[in-house]
Image (tube, rainbow, N blue to C red):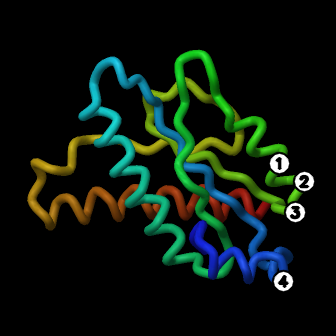
Amino acid sequence: MLFNHNDLMLLNDQIEYIDTAIIPAIPANYSARLLDIADQYEMIQYVTLGAEQQFKGRLLVLPPVQILSDYDPTGLIDTQLKEYGFKNIVVVCPQTLPIDADNVHKVDIIPLASMDNEMKQEFIQDNVKSLMKFIITLWNK
Protein backbone atom coordinates (compact mmCIF):
# COMPACT_ATOMS: atom_id res chain seq x y z
CA MET A 1 0.00 0.00 0.00
CA LEU A 2 1.04 3.53 -0.67
CA PHE A 3 0.44 6.53 1.54
CA ASN A 4 -2.55 7.91 -0.34
CA HIS A 5 -6.23 8.43 0.45
CA ASN A 6 -7.59 5.35 -1.34
CA ASP A 7 -5.04 2.91 0.12
CA LEU A 8 -5.36 4.34 3.63
CA MET A 9 -9.16 3.92 3.51
CA LEU A 10 -8.55 0.16 3.31
CA LEU A 11 -5.93 0.14 6.05
CA ASN A 12 -8.27 0.18 9.07
CA ASP A 13 -10.23 -2.82 7.80
CA GLN A 14 -7.11 -4.81 6.91
CA ILE A 15 -4.55 -3.95 9.61
CA GLU A 16 -4.23 -7.63 10.57
CA TYR A 17 -2.97 -8.37 7.03
CA ILE A 18 -1.06 -5.15 6.42
CA ASP A 19 1.24 -5.61 9.38
CA THR A 20 4.44 -4.00 8.10
CA ALA A 21 5.26 -0.33 7.57
CA ILE A 22 8.29 0.96 5.71
CA ILE A 23 9.82 4.29 6.72
CA PRO A 24 12.10 5.64 3.96
CA ALA A 25 14.73 7.82 5.67
CA ILE A 26 17.26 10.11 4.03
CA PRO A 27 19.83 12.45 5.54
CA ALA A 28 19.11 16.08 4.76
CA ASN A 29 21.64 18.88 4.85
CA TYR A 30 20.36 21.58 2.54
CA SER A 31 23.36 23.81 3.04
CA ALA A 32 25.47 21.50 0.86
CA ARG A 33 25.38 18.47 -1.43
CA LEU A 34 21.85 18.73 -2.81
CA LEU A 35 22.67 16.24 -5.55
CA ASP A 36 23.65 13.65 -2.93
CA ILE A 37 20.27 14.10 -1.22
CA ALA A 38 18.51 13.70 -4.58
CA ASP A 39 20.50 10.53 -5.42
CA GLN A 40 19.71 9.02 -2.02
CA TYR A 41 16.03 9.91 -2.24
CA GLU A 42 15.74 8.51 -5.76
CA MET A 43 17.34 5.17 -4.89
CA ILE A 44 15.41 4.74 -1.63
CA GLN A 45 12.19 5.52 -3.51
CA TYR A 46 12.88 2.93 -6.23
CA VAL A 47 13.77 0.27 -3.68
CA THR A 48 10.81 0.82 -1.34
CA LEU A 49 8.29 1.03 -4.18
CA GLY A 50 9.78 -2.11 -5.74
CA ALA A 51 9.28 -4.01 -2.48
CA GLU A 52 5.74 -2.63 -2.17
CA GLN A 53 4.88 -3.96 -5.62
CA GLN A 54 6.14 -7.44 -4.70
CA PHE A 55 4.40 -7.51 -1.29
CA LYS A 56 1.23 -5.69 -2.39
CA GLY A 57 -1.41 -5.80 0.33
CA ARG A 58 1.06 -6.77 3.03
CA LEU A 59 2.92 -3.52 3.75
CA LEU A 60 2.53 0.25 3.76
CA VAL A 61 5.21 2.60 2.43
CA LEU A 62 5.17 5.90 4.32
CA PRO A 63 6.33 9.27 2.96
CA PRO A 64 10.10 9.78 3.28
CA VAL A 65 11.46 11.09 6.56
CA GLN A 66 14.31 13.58 6.52
CA ILE A 67 17.02 13.01 9.10
CA LEU A 68 18.68 16.23 10.19
CA SER A 69 22.06 16.23 11.90
CA ASP A 70 20.52 16.83 15.31
CA TYR A 71 17.08 15.27 14.85
CA ASP A 72 16.02 11.71 13.94
CA PRO A 73 12.23 11.21 14.15
CA THR A 74 12.26 7.51 13.18
CA GLY A 75 12.01 6.30 16.81
CA LEU A 76 8.91 8.40 17.45
CA ILE A 77 7.32 7.30 14.16
CA ASP A 78 8.12 3.66 15.00
CA THR A 79 6.31 4.01 18.35
CA GLN A 80 3.27 5.68 16.77
CA LEU A 81 2.98 3.02 14.06
CA LYS A 82 3.13 0.23 16.64
CA GLU A 83 0.39 1.98 18.63
CA TYR A 84 -1.67 2.10 15.43
CA GLY A 85 -1.35 -1.67 15.06
CA PHE A 86 1.65 -2.40 12.84
CA LYS A 87 3.66 -5.41 14.00
CA ASN A 88 6.78 -4.73 11.93
CA ILE A 89 8.44 -1.40 11.16
CA VAL A 90 11.32 -1.21 8.68
CA VAL A 91 13.48 1.88 8.29
CA VAL A 92 15.12 1.96 4.85
CA CYS A 93 18.05 4.36 4.58
CA PRO A 94 21.38 4.88 2.78
CA GLN A 95 24.47 3.03 4.04
CA THR A 96 25.95 6.35 5.14
CA LEU A 97 23.18 7.22 7.60
CA PRO A 98 24.36 6.47 11.15
CA ILE A 99 21.21 4.69 12.35
CA ASP A 100 21.67 1.28 13.90
CA ALA A 101 18.80 -0.94 15.00
CA ASP A 102 17.44 -4.38 14.22
CA ASN A 103 14.73 -2.91 12.01
CA VAL A 104 17.05 -0.76 9.84
CA HIS A 105 17.85 -1.88 6.31
CA LYS A 106 20.63 0.05 4.57
CA VAL A 107 20.71 0.53 0.80
CA ASP A 108 23.74 1.07 -1.40
CA ILE A 109 23.53 4.45 -3.14
CA ILE A 110 25.13 5.45 -6.41
CA PRO A 111 24.05 8.19 -8.81
CA LEU A 112 21.60 6.52 -11.19
CA ALA A 113 21.51 9.36 -13.71
CA SER A 114 24.79 8.36 -15.36
CA MET A 115 24.03 4.62 -15.61
CA ASP A 116 22.61 2.93 -18.68
CA ASN A 117 19.08 1.57 -18.22
CA GLU A 118 19.97 -2.12 -18.07
CA MET A 119 22.62 -1.62 -15.41
CA LYS A 120 20.38 0.77 -13.45
CA GLN A 121 17.52 -1.75 -13.39
CA GLU A 122 19.84 -4.55 -12.30
CA PHE A 123 21.28 -2.44 -9.47
CA ILE A 124 17.80 -1.42 -8.30
CA GLN A 125 16.51 -5.00 -8.47
CA ASP A 126 19.46 -6.28 -6.43
CA ASN A 127 18.60 -3.75 -3.71
CA VAL A 128 14.87 -4.60 -3.89
CA LYS A 129 15.68 -8.30 -3.44
CA SER A 130 17.89 -7.49 -0.46
CA LEU A 131 15.09 -5.48 1.17
CA MET A 132 12.60 -8.27 0.47
CA LYS A 133 14.86 -10.81 2.18
CA PHE A 134 15.23 -8.45 5.15
CA ILE A 135 11.44 -8.10 5.46
CA ILE A 136 10.87 -11.85 5.16
CA THR A 137 13.43 -12.41 7.93
CA LEU A 138 11.47 -9.99 10.16
CA TRP A 139 8.22 -11.79 9.38
CA ASN A 140 9.76 -15.15 10.30
CA LYS A 141 10.96 -14.02 13.75
Dot 1 corresponds to which residue? Answer: 80
* Nearer-N-terminus badge (1/3): 1
Please state which amino acid type lies under the numbered disc 2: Glu
Which residue corresponds to the image point at 41% horizontal and 23% vertical from the top-left? 29
Q: Is residue 117 above or below residue 33?
A: below
Residue 85's disc is: 3
- Confirm or deny contact between disc 1 and disc 2 (CB under 8 A): yes
Q: CA distance from mark 1 to mark 3?
A: 9 Å
- Confirm or deny contact between disc 1 and disc 3 (CB under 8 A): no
Which residue corresponds to the image point at 65% horizontal and 67% vertical from the top-left? 60
Q: Quadrant of the C terminus?
A: bottom right
Please state which amino acid type lies under the numbered disc 3: Gly
Q: CA distance from mark 4 to mark 1?
A: 18 Å
Dot 4 corresponds to which residue? Answer: 13
Q: CA distance from mark 2 to mark 4?
A: 16 Å
* Nearer-N-terminus badge (4/1): 4
- Confirm or deny contact between disc 3 and disc 4 (CB under 8 A): no
- In-image side of 97 versus 121 (left or right): right
Q: Secondary structure at mark 3?
A: loop
Q: Is residue 124 above or below residue 91?
A: below
Please state which amino acid type lies under the numbered disc 1: Gln
Coordinates of residue 63 in the picture (x, y in percent): 56, 54
- The residue lying toward the viewer, choosing from 35 and 129, is 35
Question: Which quadrant of the figure has residue 121?
Answer: bottom left
* Nearer-N-terminus badge (3/4): 4
Q: Secondary structure at mark 4?
A: helix
- Confirm or deny contact between disc 2 and disc 3 (CB under 8 A): yes
Which residue corresponds to the image point at 80% horizontal and 53% vertical from the top-left? 81
